[in-house]
Amino acid sequence: MKKNIFLLVTVGAIAVSAHAQKSAAVQAIEEYRAMLADGNPAELFEAKGEDLWKQKRGPKNASLEQCDLGQGPGVVKAAFVTLPRFFADTQRVQDLESRLVTCMENLQGFDAAEIAKTPFGKGEQKNVTALATWIAAESRDMKFNLPQAHIKEQTAYEIGKRLFFQRGGPHDFSCASCHGADNWRIRLQDLPNLTKNPGDGVGFAAWPAYRVSNGQMWSMQLRLNDCYRQQRFPYPGFGSDATIALGVYLGVNSQGSKSIAPAIKR
């Protein structure tokens, strides 16, 4: 009897110690993030993005100041927290980056297909990321409110949901393998449950974000593409219907959450 009590006490002590270590690790990570957030390098991309918005460029030597991001031509404030959404002129549901490329083609004369083929972080793709960073910053602390009135918006949500749970690849992974339940972690990193509203500034509400580990600014398109890479799935094309649908699913699930983008990540 005494032996059993001793074992129970020992197991309990180990569990309490493990919980304390986990709590300490989480607190240390949060403190680290708070220190990094003071002077977020994303501010440099914000400044570049604002300049690019106003700058006359491309074959048509025009600015993007008449670009319609869903709030009317030239209106940037609050646009980010309503995207992805349906646009009548393209007859497509578009996220921020794919919509920016449409404006760059129509207003400035750039080749949208060429931009889509350009690797992230290079050429006009680098400029798209900077533009997205500035536009996201203009909606900071605003609540996500993605429209779902149009049938194509509703369809995109349902497709995004199916893609989120679709398993495949050599490891039989899906998005839900990492983000389908509460209190999951990997390498001391919290994995938010993205099947429901994860809360202010978590998951979808934190991108674009500056990645400290590689010194790069990551857009939501790149974040989703890299998730597919980690699942060992084929790499989606830029602005693909798949990544946009996933953005709709995650964005609608984040309804009412405040955006902290552009955030800073490890």
Image (cartoon, rainbow, N blue to C red):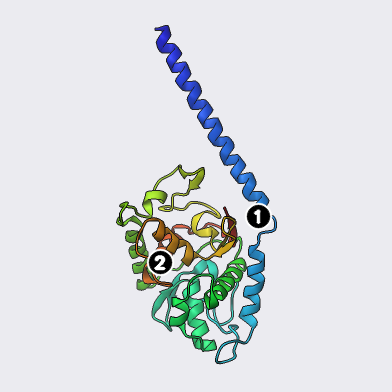
Quarter location, residue 152:
bottom left
Tag 2 near tag 1, CB within 8 Å: no
Type of residue at label 2? Thr
Q: CA distance from mark 2 to mark 1?
A: 27 Å
Q: Is residue 245 visible?
A: yes
Residue 150: mark: none
Quarter location, residue 201:
bottom right
Callout 1: 10 Å neighbours few (<14), some, many (20+)? some
| Image coords of residue 190 (percent x, y) | 50, 46
| Image coords of residue 208 (percent x, y) | 55, 63
Q: Label 1 belongs to which residue? A: 37
Quarter placement of the N terminus: top left
Type of residue at label 1? Ala
Query: Which of the two residues, 164 or 222, is positioned nearer the viewer here?
Result: 222
Secondary structure of the residue carrying numbered label 1: helix
Lateral position of residue 82 relative to residue 153, left or right = right
Query: Which of the two residues, 58 or 89, is positioned nearer the viewer here?
Result: 58
Quarter location, residue 161:
bottom left
User: Seen from this angle, which residue lies furthest top?
Assistant: 2
Q: Is residue 71 visible?
A: no
Q: Compared to 253, does 77 lie above or below? A: below
Residue at point 32%, 60% (across, down): 162
| Image coords of residue 99 (percent x, y) | 48, 77
Query: Which of the two residues, 255 or 219, is positioned nearer the viewer here?
Result: 219
Q: Compared to 4, does 66 lie above or below? A: below
Q: Earlier in the sequence, mark 2 or mark 1?
A: 1
Lateral position of residue 47 relative to residue 113, left or right = right
Residue at point 54%, 69% (across, down): 80
Q: Label 2 belongs to which residue? A: 243
| Image coords of residue 108 (percent x, y) | 54, 87
User: Seen from this angle, which residue lies furthest bottom?
Assistant: 60
